[in-house]
Image: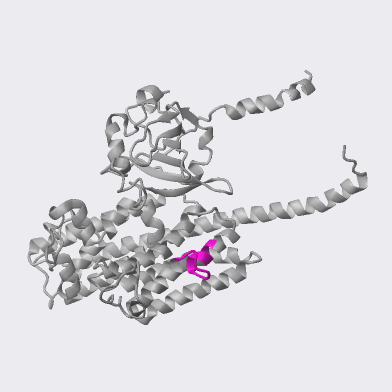
Amino acid sequence: MLKVSKSKLVLLAVTCVPLSSACNASKHKDAARRAEVVVALKQHLTASVTAWVAASHALQAAAPDGSAGWNVQTDAAAIAAMKKEWKNGRRAYELVEGAMAPLFPESDVATDSRYEDFLVREGSVADKYSFDGEGVVGMHAIERILWADTIPEAVVAYESALPGYTKAAFPTTAAEAADFKNKLVARLVKDTENLQAQLASIAPDIAFVYRGLLDLVREQVEKVDKTASGEEESRYAQSTLADLRSNLDGCEQAYAILRPWLREKSEGPAVDARITAAFAELRTLYGIESAMPSPPDQWSSLDPTPAALATPFGKLFAGTKHAADEKAPGSLVAQLRIAAKTLGLPEMP
Amino acid sequence: MNYYKLLQFLPLMCLASCQRPVAKTLPTLAAGQAFVAFERDFEDFRDWQRVPVPERGRAQGITHTAGLRREWINAKPAKGSTIFPVGTILVKEIESGMPEGHQLFAMVKRGADYNHQGAKGWEWFELFERKTGGLGIQWRGINAPVGEAYGSGDPMGGCNGCHETALGNDYVKAEAAALSALGN
């Protein structure tokens, strides 16, 4: 049997007890921080969804009442007001899309699907009548009508080849204008309110909210890449780059909630500095162009040529791809994963 | 009473209590309220009540491969139930023998209007076990995401397509999990 003197035991106790207390204190502090962060992140999600609901209501209120079809001259102020509220709503959702879409997929489908998604899913009946609350609905269905008179030729060329395509147009009759307001936009109001109610009743965990942050960064690449195949997201308003900026803002806002906790850790300030630099890099990239640049001819995201990567579109693609590449040292996702490890958060896929 | 003698049996008593399956209490929800599961809801699934599925089953689709399988339920439905109550979680573990063979799938009765075009009320999950301990959610949703073998590439039509064949048992396929067999 191991013989241990009484004095050594006392020494061991004297050394271990404070260490153990310090360790427990640190665990308690982390648990408290984690709980605070989850509450703050849910508040962040709630605030954005609430803003989206408000913008949807405002868009509906701004819509002409349906005494006639829209007139570009006489309804110019109403159309401008609707476009403004559409952009407000769009920004509100894009800030939190990464966390919300996986949790509420049906809401995401109803409010954020692209035109072709509806046609593929529901067939040619999807866009039989553009102003009701059935078939093609949601933010992009409304966008398609609001910007109907300025849709880029490339978008028309892409969409007109889709089976079930209907040419985008303003409401031309009183009935169409009324349906736009009371059916299509009303459906968005209802869907956003449903989302708000569902969000209110859940108690997310830290793994869920942090993964939302990572997914939002990862999704940037897909959004840029889809532009090359005509599937650009906010293609009618030409505001896909604004969507990306909102996604980035959303990531930064969520990160800002975690940041003070991260900086409390010994390695925290160094990790934080690298994350801040990665965010800045992406922000610079998104600030170079005013709208999504056109992809070069023969673009291939799988094997882009050096010449293609040198174009504004290629640079945007390469930059977002690097940010989302967890194996690339210094990338945003790699650094966010290091931050998660530093904070002792659960491993994420 | 000789407490020292009783202490001798303490390990056995602990063991016995540890091995007893845990019957969870379903969450209390307002009428029409959905149950949205997070990692914490799957944490102790191996302690739940086992659904006595055959240990070796034939392959179903390309994801529920042949091999060892086990299934757990967090709370059995009440006797006479015709649907599984909101908050019910079924976890299935499959060991196919392939390197990536250890898989955990789950179906959670989320309720409300969820998955209204598929297996009404059910949310599908794939889980993973962390090297550091604990369970994570690989994916969740009204179907497996594109790119997952269980999604669009599955000849059985993904989660909804396959489970639709068990419409009469509220989309739960295992015979051992028949509502008539499970009811408390």
Compared with A18, A305 (above or below) is below
Q: Residue at x 35, y 69 (%)?
A: A303
Q: Identify the residue at image location x=35%, y=33%.
A: B172
Would you say A259 lies left or right of B77 here?
right
x and y percent of residue A32 in the render? 60, 54
Camera-side residue of A197 and B90: B90
- Up/down of B36 relative to A225, above or below: above
- Is A333 in the magenta? yes
| Residue A144, quarter of the rendered image | bottom left
Q: Nearer the viewer, residue B66 or B51?
A: B66
User: What is the span of residues highlighted in magenta in the rendered image?
Assistant: A325-337
**Nearer-the-camera pick, A327 or B81:** A327
Residue B6 screen position, x and y as percent: 74, 21
Q: Image check: A270 left or right of A153?
A: right
Compared to residue A136, the image places residue B65 above or below, namely above
Callout count: 0
Q: Nearer the viewer, residue B157 or B137?
A: B157
State which quadrant residue A292 falls in: bottom left
**Percent coordinates x, y for residue B42 in the rendering:** 49, 41
